Amino acid sequence: MDITTRTVFIAGGTAGIGLELARRFRDAGSTVVVGGRRADAFESLAAEGFGTVTIDVADAESVLAARDAVLRDFPAVDTVITMAGIGTPEDLRDPAHFATTESVMDTNFLGTVRVIDAFTPHLIAHGSGTIVTVSSGIGFLPFPLMATYAASKAAVHAYSEALRAQLDGTGVEVTELVPPAVRTPMGSGNPRALELDAFGEEVMGLLALEPTPRELLVQGVLMHRFAERDGTYDELVRQRSAALATLPGRSQN
């Protein structure tokens, strides 16, 4: 991908990984539109040179309104990144966790599909472009404390594979970004989290490759992505299950 000439829309780009990639695309020379729910951040983002649009990926009408606004003001959009995501611990022994399951799946998986569906006709009509979905290393090597987050990201991976096959021949590429823990508000509690700037630099280097890789795998996520192949899956899941002791009523011993 030529990262210097793109017109990029990032759904979920007002903070964290999304904002890091937005700044790197902008600095490389691309035009970037940032979408999110944090309207309070739009003034400062506009001052940085970004287009901005309000979008709630869990709301179908909001997604379509954002699509219309983006294509009205930036009709050359050729890259769509589905960055929006949420995650929280769950106690699967407590049926009350289902509210979390619904919310996480609605944002992380169905929100991804809503954004893709909104922009796919435009990209196909354009005859070229790239959809970047965002899964997670946790989708390949579950973190049992965040069960639905892992499931939602596994769903994004499977959907990305099918989407790539269905868009074959249209000129529209599908690439999947697979982050490990990164030092953002969501990943800050992990002592092994990658620094955000180092992660962003590595991702942009991968995106700049020709052809664009099917999966964007930084070095720090390889242990997750290939745990089953490497025979480390069971032991790593066992280690990650230790975090379940932080749930209320669970033993800390």
Image: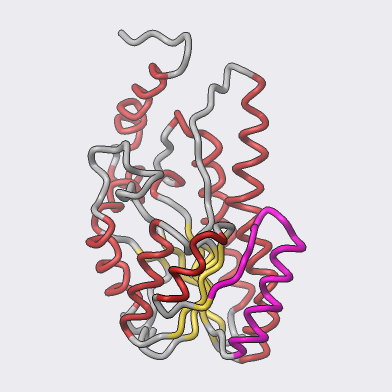
Q: Residue furthest right?
A: 61
Colour mapping used in the image: secondary structure
Instruction: Quadrant for residue 228, please give it.
Output: top left
Specify whether 116 is left or right of 203.
right
Specify whether 131 is left or right of 141.
right
From what the image shows, is residue 181 above or below residue 143?
below
Question: Is residue 131 visible in the rendered structure shown here?
Answer: no
Closer-to-camera residue (172/116): 116
Instruction: Quadrant for residue 99, please give it.
Output: top right
Residue found 58% across the figure and 51% down from its top = 108
Residue found 77% across the figure and 63% down from its top = 61
Q: Quadrant of the N terminus?
A: bottom left
Residue found 24% across the figure and 53% down from its top = 195
Residue found 34% across the figure and 37% down from its top = 233
Specify whether 110 is left or right of 30.
right
Counting from the top left corner in percent of width and height, residue 207 is at 35, 75
Magenta span contains residue 70:
yes
Counting from the top left corner in percent of width and height, residue 137 is at 39, 49
From what the image shows, is residue 61 above or below residue 49?
above
- Range of the magenta residues? 52-75
Magenta span contains residue 154:
no
Question: Is residue 233 visible in the rendered structure shown here?
Answer: yes
Counting from the top left corner in percent of width and height, residue 110 is at 66, 54
Counting from the top left corner in percent of width and height, residue 182 is at 32, 50
Closer-to-camera residue (118/61): 61
